[in-house]
Amino acid sequence: MNSNSLVSISDISKEDILCLLERARYFEEHPDHKILDGRVVATLFFEPSTRTRLSFETAVNRLGGRVIGFSDASTTSSSKGETLKDTIKMVSNYVDLIIMRHYLEGAARYATEVTDVPVINAGDGANQHPSQTMLDLYSIYKTQGTLENLTITMVGDLKYGRTVHSLLMAMRYFNPTFRFVACEELRMPAEYKDFCDKNGIRYSEHTDFSADVINSSDIIYMTRVQRERFTDIMEYEKVKNLYTLHNAMLDGSRDNLRILHPLPRVNEIDYDVDDNPKAYYFQQARNGLYARQAIICKALGIDILKEAQK
Amino acid sequence: MNTCKKELAVAALQNGTVIDHIPSSVLFKAVKILGIEKLQTHVTIGNNLDSEKLGSKGIIKVADVFFPETTLNRIALIAPSAKVNIIRDFEVVEKHQVSLPETIVGIVRCNNPKCITNNEPMKTRFEVIDRDDVTIRCHYCGHCVNSKDAQIS
């Protein structure tokens, strides 16, 4: 087990988060700092995820490291019945860092237990995806100048949305106020509301995506409402357009408001929002590169700010 | 006289372990947790016996076996009320309640079919997050389960 591994956002402290944000900012200013010369990084994608993989691989390349790996488990020995443990053990012989995505929940945690090479979790089923949370935090920090005392509205699928759950947990250090906007079927689960109660986080629940909610928000975090989440398809048809954001809805919003979305979007943000300066989802994806550069360096025990002073 | 007969409803042990005050509904889960089916010594299992505290209780008597404390404490997961009596030469030499450990390795199956533990040859691991109503959380996938719904593997 390597203590530099990043499996879950709940494993990292407030200090770690702030450290990573500061280093992400450095990488935004110096994206091509070749600090990983001679290092080899494995990207093991047991489940395809083009966006996340490209972002991680770009991060390694821009840092001057080399990448090996696979983007689909069907071409590997796991399709022959090799266990995850054996695959991780084998790859550990070759590389300095493993970045892995897996369709099974808990896979990354288990991987850290069978190898001494640091592991970064790039998503394990519906469980954790900490680099997404770091890029969300960096996007909030960058656009608001702080993470403290913000009002964050989460909209759409709050029941199954992994990104909103992780973001909610990561924000516990920063005194946020949450507004949860969702239909009855996709409400924020009780365990996360309990989490808010235990951590003294204020929140309110709404079924209506109203002007009041929008106009009092610093961040609106949109998520995709997926048809397959509904047991009753009629219910989906009823709610699918209720949580779509249109440009006109932003008329009375705060100047500092920014719209985030983990992407891909379908119809939950109308295309007329894209040209509004408050739309931030494409820059948000770009921030993923800097956040991941910071995460990779941390996992390898490299402090880029110290290295930059040399 | 009656009292005496009642006490002897289950045969006395010369040496061994008696686990008493197990709620009837979980008796056979406790049998499974202790791995009693693999034992070769005398085993007496009683169930649906009258109990003032529980209404109906089960009891397990195992001759000539003294379980490690960690094994006995696993029962706390499903029967926090269970009492352990260590018998030597027909005398109870030690009597204590089982106590719930902080982590439970390898007895409970995770209810989440997409959990890595259900798909790899590995031991499960749970952390106790609520001692009062005995809720445990999978160390790997994070799913929580109340001990009364826990599947014993």
Image: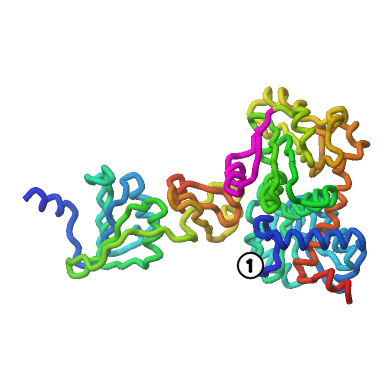
Given residues B116 and A37, the one toward you in this image is A37
Q: Residues within 10 Å of mark 1 (few under 14, many from 20)?
A: some
Q: Nearer the viewer, residue A38 or B54?
A: B54
Which corner quadrant holds the N terminus of chain A? bottom right
Q: Is residue B80 visible?
A: yes
Does residue A205 show up magenta in the picture?
Answer: yes
**Residue drawn at x 17%, y 66% as measured from the top left:** B90
Residue under the image location 27 percent in, 55 percent down:
B20
Start and end of the magenta stretch? A186-207
Chain under numbered label 1: A
| Mark 1 lies on residue | A114
Image quarter of residue A302: bottom right
Name above or below for residue A252 compared with residue A66: above
Image-based side of A88 in relation to B64, left or right:
right
Instruction: Please state the horizontal and vertical placement of residue A244, each as a whole percent of the image.
Output: 79, 30
Residue A191 pos. (x, y %): 58, 43
